[in-house]
Structure formats: structure tokens, C-alpha cells
Amino acid sequence: MAKIPTRTASTLLLVVLALIISFEVHAQSEATASSLRTESIKVDLTQEFEFLELDNNFKLYEDVSASATIDDVAQVFEDEATTQFSVGDTNIGYSSSAWWVKLSFHNPQSAPKEIILRQAYPLIDNLQLWTRSYESHWSVKQYGDKFPFSHREIYHREFLFPLIIPARSSKEYFLRYESEGSLDIALSIHEPQHLLSFVGTQQLIYGLYYGGFMVLVLYNLFIFIAVRDKAFLYYLLYIFFYGLYMGAHNGLTFQYFWPNHPQIGNEGLLVTLSLSLVFALQFSTDILNIKEFSKLLNRIAKCLMIACVVAIPAVLTMPYALMAPVMTVLTLTIMPLFFVMGVLRLASGYRPARYFMLAWTALIFSVIVYVLKVFGVLPRTFFTENGFQIGSIIEMVLLSLALGSRMTELKQQSHTDALTEIGNRRRFDDVFPVEFERAQRNKQPLALLMIDIDYFKKLNDTFGHDAGDQALRAVATTIKTLTRKPMLPCRFGGEEFAVILPRTDSAAAKIVAERIRQTIAEKPMAKREVTVSVGVASTDMGYFTSSRAIMNAADECLYLAKEMGRNRVCLFSEAPQKQAPIAASTTPPLESTTEGNEPNAAV
């Protein structure tokens, strides 16, 4: 199998890593440059609406010490000493600070206005909603994934706050964010009557998404049980843990699996990510046969697998704020490795790498779209918001196709003779009985050629095994060139070949056999003269009741051709003749042709 230079693999891996790191730095700088000073902001609820993103309608304040009280923060906002971000630019990332948001709503109508405030990003440890009553007393509602799910007023994976704005008045709200993990402030408001439709559509989409995961897991589980190929086991484990990771990322595992155990949330997110990376690496190296292809890439993959395994106990014992960035760096290191492995295997002509490359390209593209949305380069739309999920399900389907392509490749290899690159004995044994049954069912002729190289042992003993191998390859190439589909040439064993000829009668089979014999005799094989003897049998004689019978007949003809002097074709004829030792009730006679293709006397 082809090997790749160490320098080529390492250089390509470093280039991809450098591109990803430079993109991240550029995106961060773009996000920082977008901040600006602002005056007081107020959302006017004059018109009816279904859904409204709070793009530039709130003010943000960073409490670096995370110790400011609500009175302190209210005074800061009154002094306008805050920085405003648009919603697309409020991906804070990893921060030990507390972040405060001020929202102001004005209701000019004559009736109170009820709205639902939605915080879309669910992975927030501590989220507080502060409201000031008309008596200037503060009230607070406590949310976050560090608290049991029952603390939420609306039982939903995201944070939904029901608010009532009094008639012809304004009201202010303060939100306090604090989280060990990455922080994304994504606020919007909904009218209650439209929220149910919104949530229903959202749940349907997630149901289809995770249902697709379950279908792929069960499908590949059944295939693994049937074929016992480890690649299917690694693939279904990758899907399983990646699905759990995405469920934790979307807040669904907290809602449905451990609503009363919030301490599992952050650790579960990183543990499932680690396990999904372990099995993704194992699956990729297995399906691409990296161990045989490149020792360097295999060592890199093994080291990264060990790092992911070691990260699991570290996640369970060390602070989440420390391990989350470590896992991010580890993921950003592994992703380009998949791309490099796919590119190099594709360049080497390995066909399953096509689907593998398409799969990881789809996922990487969706991640880039999601990151561009996070940093405000792209608007917040359904595609940019859910591109991560869309890309991942496309990736899973394409990886499943890669597995199918690999199975086809392995089956083809198991049915192909390594030396001559034509069908092997297994291929012959699988195809010939099927073709015989089809010929009997459709009342069509089926012919078989048995071909043997003359004096092959002498050639091997005199000139060595290399010369013998060259002769075998040359004869196989000639046979393959002179036959066309649906004919199937196979190496039957040693120096013997077989050619299956569907829908071919004895006369046509005799012509094909003679053409093969004559071409080999006239063309030097491995720089030496080589000849073959050919035995031919066809079902149009009407004597064969099984595939074994016609095979025995063709083999009998082959040995008769050798007894008659070699370098000739021997065919079962229709003239009356003595019985031959084949499994049939009546045995047809034999006739032979020499170099001049003239029939010899019947045996």
C-alpha cells in the first residue's frame, strides 16, 4: 500500500491548523471592534409581532469582580457607563466576569402587554432576572443549569421569562449572567399566542434530528451484528456519544434525562465530547486504513485518542472553567486531522475517502457558518442558527455511505486475485452457480472455459517465481482484454483460469477460446513464449443438470487438450461418443482444435 512522506503529512496538518487559528483570531478581533457607546435604549411595543430579535435593544455591562449588587449595577446603567453589543456580537466566550443586561420596554396601549422574553443559549450556569416594583423594591428569579429544572417558570430547554408590561407605561428588567463555560447572550421576545407554534416547530425539528441519529445507530448496530466489522461499532458509538453531546449542548439532556441533577450537566457535556472524539478518531483510522497507509498519521491519531481518554477523569475532577477551553483546543486540533487524512487517502485513490471527505467538509463548513453567526458576520437565521446540527446529520449520513463504500471495496478485494487483479476462486464459486440457475430459468445458453498454462512448473523451476508471476499476470491481462461484460474471467487456482460466458452457446464460446489461445501463443508473455490449453463446455448441448456437471465437463476437456499435445482448444461436441466421467445422465462427445482451428477426430 502507498506510503506518504512524513514531511508532507506534517506540513499539511500545520497549514490547516494555522488557517483555523488565524480565522479564530480574526473573528475575535472583529467582535471586539464592533463595540460602541450608546444612549438609553427602549423597546416600543406599539405594534403586534410574533417574534422579535433584540438586536440593538439592550445595554451590556461587565462586572469583572462578579461582586456588584443590583443597586450598584442600576446606578452604573443610569450613568450610561456601559457598552452596547448587537445580539450577533454578544458571544462573550469564556469569562470569569458577571455580565449584566438592561432591558427597557414601553407599552403605549391602553391594556397591559404580555410578552415572553427568551434566552436562546441554554448552557448558562447562573442567570438571574431582576425587576423593580413601583415601591422601588427589587425581586429576583433564579435560573440556570446549576439549579434543578423545576426552578423554571416555563418547562423548556431554553430560558423563557413571562413578562407583563403595564398599560401606558415603561418597565425595566436586569439580567445577570455568570457561567464557567462559554457565554452567549441571545435575547428575543415572543407574543404568548405565537410561542406555542414556535416551540412546536422547534421540537419537531429536533425530533427529526435526533430521530435520524437513532435510526443510524440501530441500522449500524444490526449491520455490526451481521458482519462483525469493528468500523461499524466505532461508527455507531461515535454517533451515540455525539448525539448525547448535541443533546447536552441544546439543553435537552438536562430537561429529559437528569432534570434534578444539574451537577451532571457541565461534566456530561465534556465527557460525551471526549468519547465522541475518541470513537471518531478510531473510526477514521479504521475506515481509511491509516495504520497501513501512514505511520505518522497513525501515531498522531493514537496520541490524540490518549489525550481524549485522559481528559475524561480530568473533566470529572478539575474545574469546568479550566477543562472547557482545553477540550475546545483538543477539538480544533482533531478536526483538521480528519481533513488531512481524508485528503491524502483520496489522493491515493482510496474510493471510500470520497464520502469521508464530503462528510467532514459538510461538518466543518457548518461549524464555520455557525462561528460567523456567533461573531456577527452572518445574520441570525434558521440556517446559521441550526447549521451545526444540519452539518452534523449530513456528516453522519455521508459517513454511513463511506462505510458502505468500504464494504464494497472489501468485498471486491475478497473477490479479486491480488496477483492478476481478476476474479478469484471465491468470486467464481459465488457467481457461476447463480449464472447456471439463471440460464436454466431463462432457457439461455451458458458456457465455461477452463484455461491452463502449458509447462508452467517448468517455467517456474527454470526462470524462477518472478517469471512465473509475470506470466500469470500477462495471461490474465490477455484474457481480460479479450472478454467483455457480462463475461467474467477468474483465476481458478495456481496456473489455471476460468471464464464464465453467460448467454453464449458452444460455437461462440469456441471462438472466444480460440482467440485467447491464439493471442497468447503469438504474443510473448514475460519475454518468453507461453501457450495455454483450453477446455470448453456449454449448456446448449443439453446434457448438464448442475453447475458442477458443466464445470467437470470443461475440466475434462482441458485435460484432454493437454493429453493431445497442449496449445489447443477442446470442445464438447454433439456427435455420439463414449461416456465421459461427468455428473450427467448422458455425456456429450469431445472434439479438439489445434492452432489452425480445425476439428480433430472425435475422442
Image: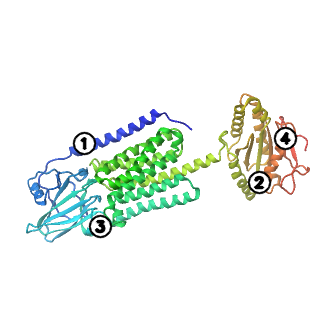
Q: Nearer the viewer, mark 2 or mark 3?
A: 3
Q: What separation in Å lies between label 4 and label 1 (alpha carbons)?
A: 83 Å
Q: Which residue is mark 2?
A: 547
The disc at residue 29 is 1
- Looking at the rendered structure, the secondary structure element under dot 3 is helix
Q: Residue 561 shows which numbered tag? A: 4
Left or right of residue 226, residue 399 in this image = left
Which quadrant holds the C terminus?
A: top right
In the rendered structure, which disc, 1 or 2, sits on the residue that comes first in sequence? Answer: 1
- Residue 217 image offset from top left, x and y in percent: 48, 59
Q: Quadrant of residue 449?
A: top right
Labels 2 and 3: the sequence-earlier one: 3
The amino acid type, in three-letter code, at marker 1 is Ser
Q: Residues within 10 Å of mark 3 (few under 14, many from 20)?
A: many
Disc number lying in front (1 or 3): 3
Residue 149 is labelled as 3
Number of the label disc, if any, that sits on residue 388:
none
Left/right placement of residue 567 relative to residue 395 reads right
The residue mark sitting in front, 4 or 1, is: 1
Q: Amino acid at mark 2?
A: Ser
Circles 1, 2 touching at the beta carbon (< 8 Å): no
Counting residues from the start of the chain, the first of labels 4 and 1 encountered is 1
Is 291 situated above or below 267?
A: above
Count the labels in the image.
4
Residue 208: x percent and y percent? 41, 62
Above-or-below relation of 460 to 499: above
